[in-house]
Image (spheres, coloured by chain):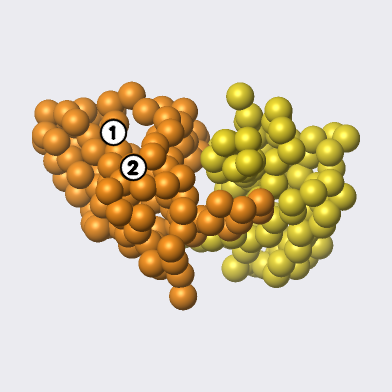
Chain colours: A yellow, B orange
Amino acid sequence: GDSVTQMEGPVTLSEEAFLTINCTYTATGYPSLFWYVQYPGEGLQLLLKATKADDKGSNKGFEATYRKETTSFHLEKGSVQVSDSAVYFCALSDLEAGTALIFGKGTTLSVSS
Amino acid sequence: DVKVTQSSRYLVKRTGEKVFLECVQDMDHENMFWYRQDPGLGLRLIYFSYDVKMKEKGDIPEGYSVSREKKERFSLILESASTNQTSMYLCASSFISRGAEAFFGQGTRLTVV
């Protein structure tokens, strides 16, 4: 079945450092790809998404590009802030093929000042 | 604002009890989902529903059932609670369209003693 693999955490960075969180997927169809974020004590919320190959999703300084050839959707940010400390989840869905939203295991990011 | 509301933030139940977790959404979404979130395992899909009275098993349906009698409400039922069902339960909803964002409730922290 479809699946998502993302890098294990925790990731610990200093403020203003560059962030990359790797995400790869396996899918039989042509899924949409997402990054969700969960801040401490809160529910999940969408960070960004891409629905077709070579699309770049972006939000709040975060970016990810849908790479069909490498089946990847890596999350990047050029300069992280303490307020970015959270758990980040990569996910895919292919509702047209009957695949509900499937998540990776999550990566905890901790940013110190 | 889209709202997905879960009936309880915290629940403590005894082993063998029948437990109902309720979820209501106010956006007329077709899809509704139940996940459980455990440290190191991420979000795992229990069941989802794409229409009233319709349901599909996710990755870990054993020990759970669901009910969707109205479009806005999706219930998760633990027929006979066990200690290994102690977890955070998350409900979500979305439209059925490519790239549709899922909206999450705040979660129910269930402890089975």
Q: Residues within 10 Å of mark 1 (few under 14, many from 20)?
A: some
Q: Position of residue A1 (x, y in %)?
A: 61, 24
Q: Is residue B10 above or below residue A68?
A: below
Q: Answer left or right for A107 relative to B27.
A: right
Chain letter for mark 2? B
In what element is the residue under mark 2? Answer: loop
Which residue is pictured at 33% across the width and 42% down the height?
B53
Q: Position of residue B87 (x, y in %)?
A: 33, 40
Q: Answer left or right for B62 relative to A101.
A: left
Which residue is pictured at 20% across the width and 49% down the height?
B11
Residue for badge 2: B53
Point out the frontmost of discs 2 and 1.
2
- The answer to whether residue A81 shows anywhere in this view is yes
- The residue nearer to you, when weighing B86 against B64, is B64
- The residue nearer to you, when weighing B34 against B87, is B34
Q: Answer left or right for A66 relative to A46.
A: right
Q: Amino acid at mark 2?
A: Lys
Disc marking residue A75: none
Chain letter for mark 1? B
Q: Quadrant of residue A2?
A: top right
In what element is the residue under mark 1? Answer: strand
Q: Quadrant of the C terminus of chain A?
A: bottom right
Which residue is pictured at 20% across the width and 44% down the height?
B20
Q: Position of residue B75 (x, y in %)?
A: 28, 46
